[in-house]
Image (cartoon, rainbow, N blue to C red):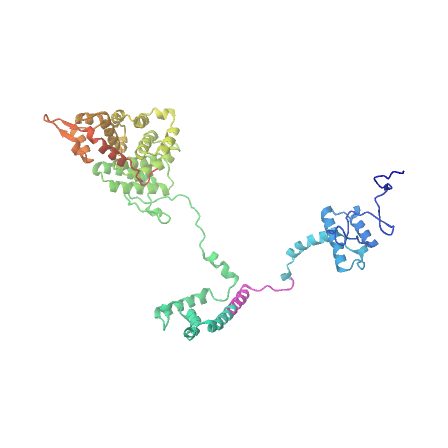
Amino acid sequence: MATQSAFTPVSVRRTFAQHGPSGTSIQPSHTQLSSNPSASGQTKVNWPEPVRNYVQRAFAVENTATDVSRQEMEVRLKEVIGDSVKNGTLHTTDWPNARLPQQIILEERKKPASLSANPPWGNGVTPLSLQETNNKAHDALSKKRKSSELESHQIGQDKLPPWRVANFHNVFEDRISHPDKRQRGEGSAKSSSKSQKRKQRFENGHSGDVSQQSFYSSNISSPAPEVDQGPVIGRCQNLEKKYFRLTSAPNPETVRPLPVLEKTLEFLKKKWKKENNYSYACDQLKSLRQDLTVQHIKTAFTVSVYELHARIALEKADLGEYNQCQTQLRALYSQQLGGHPEEFKAYRILYFIHTCNRTDMNDVLADLTAAEKQHPAVKHALDTRSALALGNYHRFFQLYLETPNMGAYLMDMFVGRERLVALSNICISYKPDVKLRFVTEELGFESDDESARFVCDHGGQSFLDEREEGEVRLLTGKALKFFEGAKAAAFKTVDIKGQI
């Protein structure tokens, strides 16, 4: 009994040629052409010989375009042949002379560049002027408005109730003639005069004749920016001059030159010692500083002017002017123009203690050099900061009585606050009472009367007890809560004008 094999033997293919139904072989192409490529179960089309030759020409090496990728060429080839099949021109198209896919792609890429170089509206067509364009747009807009008003009027008459139809014809007229209900009627003479002025203004400068010149009129009429001519050279010879804030370029006739300013400073020093009039001195010093600024004078004399003004402001507790001078002095000291930079750095440390500004305090401490830390004024300010940081009020009030230069004026601004802190600590440490003389010595008062007055000024007179021998004692056991509240109120932050 003969056995049947599990497979059907076939002959081996020697070439890649496909055998059609009629036995003719079709040359292989790089693309599979069908009437519907997406349909897999349909019968393939028997492509004519010119179409196959067209495909071969498209893939020929001599027709390869470097600017067109193979994928782009294959997609366009399918589109060309597919369109001919859909249009029924597969057999009537002159395929030997037809443009190849890569040629079609290159021609399409050139079209946008040619269109941008030669716009269609520039070929024999005169562009409309701006006025004609505006007039046409205005006419079209007005027609639309009129038509929409008429339509809304007709529709509104059909839909509105009878009691509102009677006065409907005045709505559009009222909106044009009288935008505001209060202006309905004859109108006032004031409104008519305004409309006449508006009409004349539009007839003179904003009428319908819009030309290219009108677009540049604003630029032509606007003044050119003034060129900086450098510092002003003053010619005024007056020693005294009131301070005025500048609102325009300074006039050299009202600015004093440097030799006159030097005489002015000596004159102000003598007058300050004699009269001690701060309002006058501050006004004159600000005027002097202004003349230095407009003339761009930055010398050792400038430093001396700002230092003098800062000291006088400290003496009169004017922190606003002091801060302005201190800010300028920092810039002048950086230019190595002389002066007393260590003295004013010590003032800055004490000022930041007063304002409780820890951030700027850290910046100042980081900028100090080893030599500056050994300067007496700076060393005293650093010791003061350290005593407060450690809560050593005994050491703090000793430093307060030994303050160099004019630092005592700054310490006077926060010593009362620190005395309240010290009183709270004394009330915690000493109970039930303590001698007032002890408080006077520890808190840096000059006498017992001054320390008692300090306690009374803060509302603590009920905590002072006078004994038989004339000795006054502070009832610390009862005063603790009171001084704790006073201390908290004293440390509230206050915004200071001109602070740095």
Q: Position of residue 429 (x, y in %)?
A: 23, 25
Q: In terms of depth relative to the viewer, which is nearer, 347 or 17?
A: 17
Query: Where's the C terminus, which quadrant?
Result: top left
Asked if residue 233 is positioned above or below residue 158 in the image, the reply reads above
Asked if residue 447 is positioned above or below residue 317 in the image, the reply reads above
Q: Position of residue 80 (x, y in %)?
A: 75, 54
Q: In terms of depth relative to the viewer, which is nearer, 348 or 416?
A: 416
Residue extending furthest toward the right: 1
Question: In the rendered image, is residue 239 in sight?
Answer: no
**Residue for point 25% across, 25% down:** 394
Question: In the rendered image, is residue 315 in sight?
Answer: yes
Residue extending furthest toward the front: 1
Relative to 422, 151 lies left or right: right
Residue 137 forms part of the magenta stretch: yes
Relative to 7, 403 lies left or right: left
**Residue for point 51% across, 61% down:** 213
Q: In terms of depth relative to the viewer, which is nearer, 485 or 109?
A: 485
Dividing the picture into quadrants, the one containing residue 132 is bottom right
Q: Position of residue 218 (x, y in %)?
A: 47, 58
Relative to 482, 346 lies left or right: right
Asked if residue 252 is positioned above or below residue 384 in the image, the reply reads below
Relative to 84, 499 lies left or right: left
Q: Position of residue 425 (x, y in %)?
A: 25, 27
* Main secondary structure found in the magenta portion: helix
**Residue for point 52% across, 68% down:** 144
How many numbered discs? 0
Residue 133 forms part of the magenta stretch: yes
Residue segment shown in magenta = 123-143
Query: Where's the N terminus, which quadrant?
Result: top right
